[in-house]
Image (tube, rainbow, N blue to C red):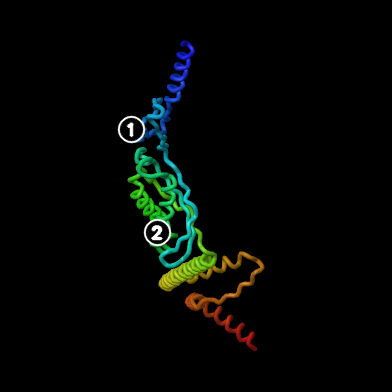
Amino acid sequence: MDVFLGIVIVVVLIVLLRSIVQVNEYERGVKFHLGKFSKIINPGWRVILPIVESYKKVDIRTKVVDVPEQDAITKDNVSVRINAVIYYKIFDAAKAVLEVENFYYAVSQLAQTTMRNAVGSVSLDELLSEREKLSDSICKVIDAATDPWGIKVENVELKDVQLPEDMKRVIAKVAEAEREKAAVITKAKGEVEASQNLAIAAETMAKTPGAMHLRTLSTINDVSSDQSNTLIFCIPIEVLDAFRAGNGGAKVVKEIQKLTRKDEE
């Protein structure tokens, strides 16, 4: 009798120990009683009666799904390969267990089909220049589809867009042509501004007495800084007029004329 009682006590202890389960803070448990959904088990130690009751743990932390590369065709019939990363978390553990068989696999497959459909609705230029906008569009579609599963899609990021080699060469040529176009336009604008400034400077110097003399002297000073240079310049007519107007100016002019005639002979 004592042996039988001891066996019963041991069996009861084993059953009690196996009935105690631990649910971590980042988990929720979905409890079933005789196969029917009973309630959500919160974090801590809980008692699950063997045979009669069962449970399934669900991790409610944010999960990351790396969507594999997908072949897609854009709206303008360009073949591309894209891949993405999806961030989502479970806000209703019961729905995640009861409404879908394998929510991880289901989200991955849904993301693949949604990406292909989204890429097919935009052109190549839109895909490359508005990647963030396309990611938001994909996120909204997936989030709406997974809401009945108790899943909230937080973000979708397109990681990479791979183009065919011939398309890469075409895009490189277009970019080079755009750079050359910008360089020509900038150079033309610079020449226009330079010519306008020269015209303004010429007009100002023509209206200002002595401006040409100052400019000539400044140029002579710049050129004569190097002793190896030989400077030949013409005397402005204003200098000769100054000699004529002053005392002895006529004599200087006559001497210059004589020297000129001798050189000619």
Q: Which residue is mark 1?
A: 39
**For residue 43, above or below residue 165:** above
Question: If the image is split into quadrants, where does the C terminus sit?
Answer: bottom right
In the rendering, at what x and y percent does residue 18 appear?
45, 25
- Is label 1 in a helix, a strand or a loop? strand
**Amino acid type of the residue that numbered disc 1 sits on in the rendered structure:** Lys
Q: Nearer the viewer, mark 1 or mark 2?
A: 1
| Residue 250 percent across, percent down from the top left | 52, 80
Which sits in the foreground, 125 or 110?
A: 110
Considering the numbered disc 2 on the image, is that residue within a helix, a strand or a loop?
A: helix
Q: Is residue 205 visible in the rendered structure shown here?
A: no
Residue farthest along the front direction in this orientation: 1
Would residue 157 be seen by someone viewing this image from the given angle? yes
Amino acid tagged 2 = Asn
Which residue is found at the position 48% from the left and 60% from the top?
71
- Is 264 located above or below residue 211 in the figure? below
